[in-house]
Amino acid sequence: MAASDQPLSSYSDTTPHKKVITDSIDIISPDDVPIVKYFGIAGDPGRFNMMHWPGTKPYWLESTLPALTDTMAATAASDDTTLQVTDGTIYHVGDVLQISTEKVWVSSLTTNTLTVTRNFGGTQVTLASDATITRIGNARVEGAEASYDRGVSDITEAYNYTQIFQDDLRLSRTAQKLSQWGINDYFDFEAQQKLKDLLILMEKSFFHGERKAGSASTPRAFGGIETFITDNTSSLSDAALTEKDVVDLIEDCWDDGGHPNLLVCNSWVKRKINSFWEGMVRTSRDEHSGGVLISQIDTDFGTLNVLMDRWCPKDTLYALETDYIGFLEFDPFYQEMLAKTGDRINGEVVGEYTLVVKNDKAHGYITSISTSS
C-alpha cells in the first residue's frame, strides 16, 4: 500500500473523510419538518448574545426591565399618603401611578413603603390591599437630586444543552454492490433516509424536548420550547378554541413587550384558524377554486404567519417571536463509515444541535384545546 505524500493535506487520501450531509436537508419536504425548515439548523450564535460557544452547555444573556405593574400590599384609606406595595424595587421618586380610579405621585420611598401625593388625577378612593398598581409616567421636580431608588436591569444567563442525534447503518457488501433502479449508491440512499428520520425527531424535540445535563451513562438533551416559555400560558380544559382565544394569546405576548410573528399548530387548530378568518378574505370574480387557506393573519398587535406542523401537539397553539428562537449547530450532520466487521459495510449518520429560546415573555401558548369541537 502506497503512503500519502507529506505534508498530509485535505487533498491527500480523501477516503476516510466524513461526508457532510447537512445540505441534503434542502431536498426534504417542508411538510415533513416545517419547524426545521423555518428556523434552519445552523443559526448564528452572535444574534443570541451567546456565551461559551461552541460548548455542550451554551449560555445566552438576557436582561429584564423593571415591571410596569405591582399590587398593593395593604389597604390605604382615601386620605392616606403612605402606601404599602409588594415590590418596592420597581419604583422611583417622580413615578406617576394608576391605582383603581386614582392617579398618585411618588415623592419618596423606603423599601416597600411609598410616600405619595394623592389625587394627582382621577377620583380619590380607598385603595384595596390587592389593587393593581400601574406605572404610567414619571415627573421629577425641577432641580431635584438624583435618588437612585430603582434597581438597574438584571442580566441573567439562560442555557440549554446540546443533543446528539444518531442512527447507524449496516449493509452487506453484496447489497451495496447490486445495481438499483434510480439509486446510484445504496449506502448514500439509506443514509438520506436515516437523516430524514433524525430531522423528524429533532422537530419533535422542539415541542417535547426535556433539558438534561447527561452523564457518562445518560444522554444530554436540549429542552424544547415549553422549557423556556413560563409566561403567557393558559389551558382551555378541553373547550373549543375561539378567535378571541387566539387574539388574547397574541395580546398577552404584546402586553409583555413581545411582537409575536408566528403561530404554530397542528391540523385541527389550523382548521379552526381557517374558519375564524376565511370570511374576511377578499377574492376576485375570476376565482374558480374552492376553499380558503389562511397562511397569515392581521391583528392590532401585528401580522403573524401560520405554520401547520403535523408533529405539533394536536391540542396546543403556540405564538412565537421568531427573532428570539433558533437551532444552533454544534456539529453538523455527517455520514461516516465505521470499522468494518464481517462481510458488511458499517456506518452512521450523526449530528449535534441545541435550541435557543430567548425572552420568554415574547412567546406564549394555549394547551388542552378541544380536538373535536
Image (cartoon, helix red, strand yellow):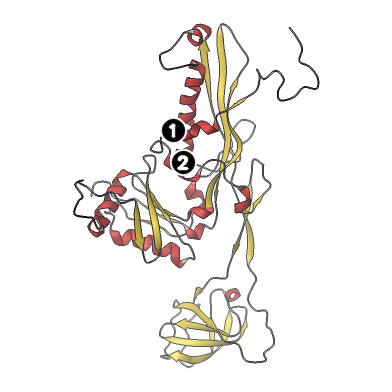
Which residue is the site of mark 1?
A: 28
Q: Is residue 320 left or right of residue 240?
A: right
Q: Is residue 41 visible?
A: yes
Which image quadrant: the N terminus? top right
Task: List x then y, in percent, for residue 6.
Answer: 81, 19
User: Relative to the observer, which residue lies in front, 138 or 86?
Assistant: 138
Q: Vertically, is 270 above or below 99?
A: above
Instruction: List x then y, in percent, for residue 263.
Output: 39, 52
Give whichever of 302, 90 is nearer the camera: 302
Which of the marked residues, 2 or 1, is nearer the chain's N terminus? 1
Left or right of 120 on screen, residue 60: right
Q: Amino acid at mark 2?
A: Lys
Residue at figure coordinates x 47%, y 56% from the top left = 321
Q: CA distance from mark 2 to mark 1?
A: 9 Å
Q: On residue 364, which mark appears?
A: none
x and y, in percent, of residue 18 in the image:
62, 24
Q: Quadrant of residue 248?
A: bottom left
Residue 43, percent across and down?
57, 45
Residue at figure coordinates x 48%, y 43% from the top left? 206
Query: Looking at the picture, which amino acid does disc 1 mark?
Result: Ile
What residue appears at the point 38 percent right and 38 percent down from the top-left corner? Answer: 31
For residue 37, which numbered disc appears in the image?
Answer: 2
The answer to whether mark 2 and mark 1 are in CB contact below 8 A is yes
> Few, some or many C-alpha atoms within 10 Å of disc 2 (few <14, some 14-19, many ≥20)?
some
Q: Height in image: 353 above or below 140? A: above
Lateral position of residue 252 relative to residue 63, left or right: left
Mark 1 secondary-structure assignment: loop
Taking depth in this image into account, of 331 and 79 the one nearest to the observer is: 331
